[in-house]
Every structure is written in structure tokens, then in C-alpha cells.
């Protein structure tokens, strides 16, 4: 990052908590806020990086989708303003599509992020797309709906390839395994369901949370799956046997989690109406709380690591986007 726009944020970086009760005098990691992107007029609900790491996409409740230059922090373009709140944004692995979910008209819009052209509309049959995820090879776009089902789309033909029938619980989060064989879903009934993407059959139902599952993500090697919930816990699962490897106990509702590309960190973003946003960096192998980041004023809605793992992107309720780094 060339710009260091928000150096004052460094002084507010929270001191490490090893647990809810114990603190250390020194940080185990030293992540700092290196930039703040401002321009949205509403809550930033979703953020993601372009596959080459040069650009950032953000979707907001202000109806805007903004493409940012990740190096300068400047707006490149604001995409076509649609009807209402943007629920999710997802950049295709080849960089040619930006998929955006809208709550109001319940459709998914495919944009060309390079020139802002609206390419097509994927109609969701009257259901709201709460979550989007591209398969690692880019062949499928998965969308999860408030009616509980998941649709796999062919982005080139714009046709539904397969529908994974759920139990009616809202699909709040989707994540493909690194090999593309499995699709994990975080549900409103407090469960995590893992699907075989080829057969469309359920592989595992993981039960352990006491509130809805807001976010799911795989470890880079595909051995583990992490899930985060409004119950304040993050659970790391062994998907092969369905067992809980460890539980990371937080203090506030966890809205988003993201595993760093090198597997070294698991980042979690929190916040609710009583308690504002904190990002926690965990050691996923030991469950150790390494550092807590945030200004304590705005909920963290979305997290995304850059492809090279050097930067952590945060979308917040106050309309800002923060970029964190150890460098």
C-alpha cells in the first residue's frame, strides 16, 4: 500500500487478549491499519479482492457497488445503481465477472468489472440471494437464498445447473473447498451443511452452534472448515469425521471469518447492536488469540484477505473500508 491515510488508527489498535480475561503486554502480531477507503453512504455489507489483487469491490446498503484501486485507494468506478441493498459481491477467479446479490428485487447481477457493463441478470424466482461463492475453477457460481436452497449457475449460459434443496433455513454463507468438490453452507437453523457439489447430496450436517451461522470458510489445504455464529463462537471442524477440532471463544456475535492464504491466521469480525466491531486474529492451529484490531465504534460486516495474504480487508457498518497489514 502506498497510502498511509489513517495513521491515527495505529494508536487505537487493541492490545492482545489471550482470552476474555487475560492480557499480555506485548502483541504477538503487529497488524496496523494502513488505509481507509471512504465513499459509501451506507453500511458496507461485502468486500472482496480481484484475483490479481489490484482491485477491491465493495457492496453497500446505499445501493452502490464500488471498484477501488487497491494500490492508491481511489475509486475506479461505481457500477450501475440498482434497486436497493447489496447483500454480497464475489469476483470470479478469471476476473471477468463480478457477481452481486440484491435484496430488493431478489436477483443476481453479473457485471464486467473492467468497464462496469451490466452483463446479465440471474433471476432467483422471488427469493433473496444472501450469499454468493464462485467455484475455484470458475465453472459455477453458487447462490444461497432466504428460502433455504442453493443454486449452482453456469455464468456463461446464465442457466441453473443444479439446485441443492435445503430445509427452509436461510443460507447466510457459502464457501467452496479448495479442490471444488464440496460446498459448505452456514444456515439460519444454527447448522453447517456440507454438500457434494457434483451429486448435489448432503455429505455432513455439522451441529454445535446455538445461534445462526453467519460465515463459513475452508482452510487453504482443505483439511478443516471454520464456522462463525451469533453465539460468539468460532468452531473449527474436521469435515471427514464431523468432529470439532477446537472452539475459539469470542465475546461478541461473529459476522465474518476469513482464513489467510498461507493458513497462518484466521480472522474474525464481530459486532452487534450493543457491542461494536473488533477484528480478532487467531492462530487456527492452537486457538490462540494473537491480536485484536478495531476502533470499537463500528460493526465489522465482511472480511477478505488479499490473494498474496499481505492485506486484510474490512467492510464496516459506518460505510468505511479498512485495510490492515503487518508491513
Image: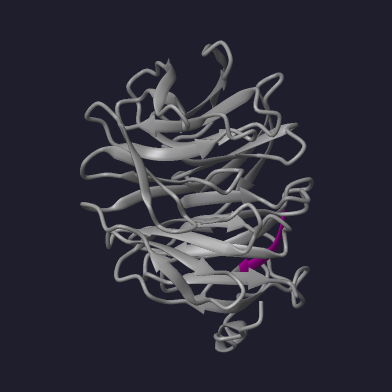
Quarter assignment of residue 157? top left
Give the residue drawn at x 42%, y 74%.
Answer: 297
> How would you classify the magenta stretch by its main secondary structure?
strand
Outermost residue, bottom direction?
8
Q: Say which residue appears at 47% left-offset and 31% top-offset.
A: 156
Quadrant in the rendering for residue 326: bottom right
Left or right, 97 with respect to 104, comes to: right
Q: Can residue 30 be seen in this view?
A: yes
Q: Which of 327 and 256 is in front in this view?
A: 327
Q: Where is residue 25 in the image (x, y as percent from the top left)?
A: 75, 77
Residue drawn where x is 62% and y is 70% of the image: 324
Q: Visible in this render: residue 188?
A: no
Q: Give the range drawn in magenta.
A: 288-292
Residue 201, relative to residue 322: is it above or below? above
Q: How many marks?
A: 0
Where residue 134 appears, as percent x and y from the top left, is 54, 37
Image quarter hosting the N terminus: bottom right
Near-viewer residue (291 or 87): 87
Q: Relative to residue 258, is residue 191 depicted above or below?
A: above
What percent of the width, then of the height, locates residue 6?
A: 55, 85
Quadrant placement of the C terminus: bottom right
- The answer to whether 156 appears left or right of 84 in the picture is right
Q: Position of residue 93 (x, y in %)?
A: 61, 43
Q: What colouring style does the render use?
A: one colour
Could you say which is closer to the camera, residue 252 or residue 181? 181
- The magenta stretch spans residue 220: no
Amino acid at each position: 500500500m502506498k497510502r498511509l491515510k489513517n495513521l491515527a488508527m495505529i494508536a487505537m489498535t487493541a492490545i492482545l487478549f489471550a482470552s476474555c480475561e487475560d492480557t499480555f503486554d506485548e502483541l504477538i502480531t503487529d497488524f496496523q491499519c494502513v488505509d481507509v477507503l471512504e465513499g459509501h453512504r451506507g453500511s458496507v455489507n461485502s468486500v472482496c479482492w480481484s484475483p490479481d489483487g489490484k482491485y477491491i469491490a465493495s457492496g453497500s446498503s446505499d445501493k452502490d457497488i464500488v471498484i477501488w484501486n487497491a494500490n492508491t485507494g481511489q475509486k475506479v468506478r461505481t457500477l450501475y445503481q440498482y434497486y436497493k441493498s447489496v447483500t454480497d459481491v464475489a469476483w470470479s477467479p478469471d476476473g471477468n465477472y463480478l457477481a452481486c446479490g440484491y435484496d430488493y428485487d431478489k436477483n443476481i447481477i453479473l457485471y464486467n468489472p473492467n468497464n462496469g457493463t451490466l452483463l446479465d441478470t440471474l433471476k432467483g424466482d422471488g427469493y433473496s440471494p444472501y450469499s454468493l461463492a464462485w467455484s475455484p475453477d470458475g465453472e459455477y457460481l453458487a447462490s444461497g437464498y432466504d428460502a433455504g436452497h442453493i443454486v449452482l449457475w453456469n455464468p456463461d449460459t446464465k442457466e441453473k445447473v443444479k439446485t441443492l434443496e435445503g430445509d427452509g433455513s436461510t443460507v447466510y454463507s457459502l464457501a467452496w473447498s479448495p479442490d471444488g468438490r464440496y460446498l459448505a453452507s452456514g444456515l439460519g437453523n444454527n447448522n453447517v451443511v456440507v454438500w457434494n457439489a457434483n451429486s448435489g447430496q448432503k455429505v455432513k450436517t455439522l451441529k454445535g452452534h446455538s445461534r445462526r451461522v453467519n460465515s463459513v470458510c475452508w482452510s487453504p489445504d482443505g483439511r478443516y472448515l471454520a464456522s462463525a455464529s451469533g453465539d460468539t463462537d468460532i468452531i473449527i471442524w474436521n469435515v471427514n469425521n464431523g468432529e470439532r477440532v477446537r472452539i475459539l471463544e469470542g465475546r461478541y456475535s461473529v459476522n465474518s471469518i476469513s482464513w489467510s492464504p498461507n493458513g497462518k491466521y484466521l480472522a474474525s469480525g464481530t459486532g452487534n447492536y450493543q457491542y461494536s466491531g473488533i477484528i480478532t486474529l487467531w492462530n487456527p492451529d492452537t486457538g490462540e488469540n494473537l491480536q485484536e484490531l478495531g476502533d470499537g465504534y463500528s460493526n465489522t460486516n465482511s472480511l477478505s484477505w488479499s490473494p498474496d495474504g499481505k492485506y486484510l480487508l474490512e467492510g464496516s457498518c459506518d460505510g468505511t473500508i479498512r485495510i490492515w497489514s503487518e508491513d
